[in-house]
Amino acid sequence: MITVRLFGMTKSLADNQSSLTLALGKNQSVKNVIELVKKRYPKIGELIYQKKILVSVNQEIAHDDTRVQEGDEVALLPPFAGGTPAGPR
Amino acid sequence: MITVRLFGMTKSLADNQSSLTLALGKNQSVKNVIELVKKRYPKIGELIYQKKILVSVNQEIAHDDTRVQEGDEVALLPPFAGGTPAGPR
Amino acid sequence: MSTAEQNELLVRVQREDFSVDAEINRVRSRSRRIGGISIFLGTARDHSKGRDVDGITFEHYEGMAQKKLREIRERALKDFDILELLIVHRYGEITIGENIVLIIAGAEHRADAFRACKWAIDELKQITPIWKLEHTPSGEVWVEEHP
Amino acid sequence: MSTAEQNELLVRVQREDFSVDAEINRVRSRSRRIGGISIFLGTARDHSKGRDVDGITFEHYEGMAQKKLREIRERALKDFDILELLIVHRYGEITIGENIVLIIAGAEHRADAFRACKWAIDELKQITPIWKLEHTPSGEVWVEEHP
């Protein structure tokens, strides 16, 4: 199980929950997390595909292939107050 | 008679007087003021010729031909704290 | 105070308002060589993109926000000829006119202080996970600024 | 307070120290549209051009100094997209570490505030009749900065 933290607009789109708990298997990546989120909240999934929502793993912006395992801190980050973040660095 | 105000280094060069009183005739310009100052304080005159000291008339930077008459506020301005002023504007 | 404790005070995300004078003194106390201090203070405007705004709520990602701000301070100290850089960002409800964010860059010379301060606020806006909810007469909206 | 009286408070040459918070509030009270405030604070460094400095005395040309600072404020308000600009410069004896000069530019957007603030301090250094006497271990010297 992993916990995905939600903020701002992402939280609003998920019925104001501040986190989601997902059942994630072994050898999974951010891509798999996105698929699970999309099933429950298609609108969030869409915004992730449009790069309007970024995914972070352990407080760093991640990309589709970033590995995710039990205990990692995953979060969905809508556009920051200061403007859209520049994507994975 | 006109009064020439002195500041900073210029004051030091004139035995710490904060102003000079000069007998100036009619139809005179900054050039004539400089000549009178130079007679009494050659070092100041030299610095004026080197443009290290500027002359102001009525609180504006003046040039050699600026007219000076009784009642005008004349001052000798050494380099400002922030750097040499850019000369007449 | 240990260096780690001092550094923690130089990068903060907090609910309370701050005193600019007190924060300047914090920076100033780090070096007697400081001659130029460039400060950016962001405050809550009463309108945004043509909408009236009654108030703002900031939400941040606790932990990641601080981490990004620490990275900005460290990069500024490395990349610019400055002696200290301080960053404070508020969260929670903010009334129109109130302080939101403060950057203070202290350098020997003013041009370096200006460059570092400008870079730090631009970078903060880009990489810090902080979100802004504007309260307007027609409802609440999560917004991003386009600078 | 009349507009003239308010404007006089926005451009001052004074012996006393100033509070940056109080001056920010003066600027902020001029418009609720202000969202970005850029501040420059010049302070007395403990060395200059390789010399140790124990203290500084500033002398100014009363009347002309204020006139030049008023011109800078008026040109900044005209040439930049800002809502207010404040300038305070101290004179007299100043201890190492103390405040010398303060510029505050308030704008809707930060880039305009930075540009105006940077321009104003550069211009102040160029055109304001203020002189600096540095007290060093080997004597006193009238100096000009080369920025």
Image: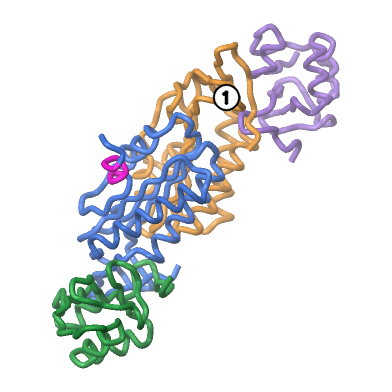
Chain colours: A green, B purple, C blue, D orange
Q: Is residue B13 above or below residue C45?
A: above
Q: Residue at x 44, y 55 (%)?
A: C120
Mark 1 — residue?
D60
Quadrant (top left/top right/bottom left/bottom right) for the C terminus of chain A: bottom left
Residue A51 position within the rendered picture, expressed as x and y whole percent measured from the top left: 38, 82
Q: Residue at x 24, y 60 (%)?
A: C63
Q: Classify mark 1: helix, strand or loop.
A: strand
| Span highlighted in magenta in the image | C4-9
Front residue of C41 and B31: C41
Which quadrant of the structure image shows residue C61?
A: bottom left
Which quadrant of the structure image shows residue A64?
A: bottom left
Task: Name which residue type carries label 1.
Answer: His
Q: Is C5 a magenta residue?
A: yes
- Residue farthest to the top, as pictured: B15
Is any atom of residue C55 visible in this view? no
- Residue farthest to the front, as pictured: A27
Q: Residues within 10 Å of mark 1 (few under 14, many from 20)?
A: many
Q: Is C112 displayed left or right of B29 in the figure?
A: left
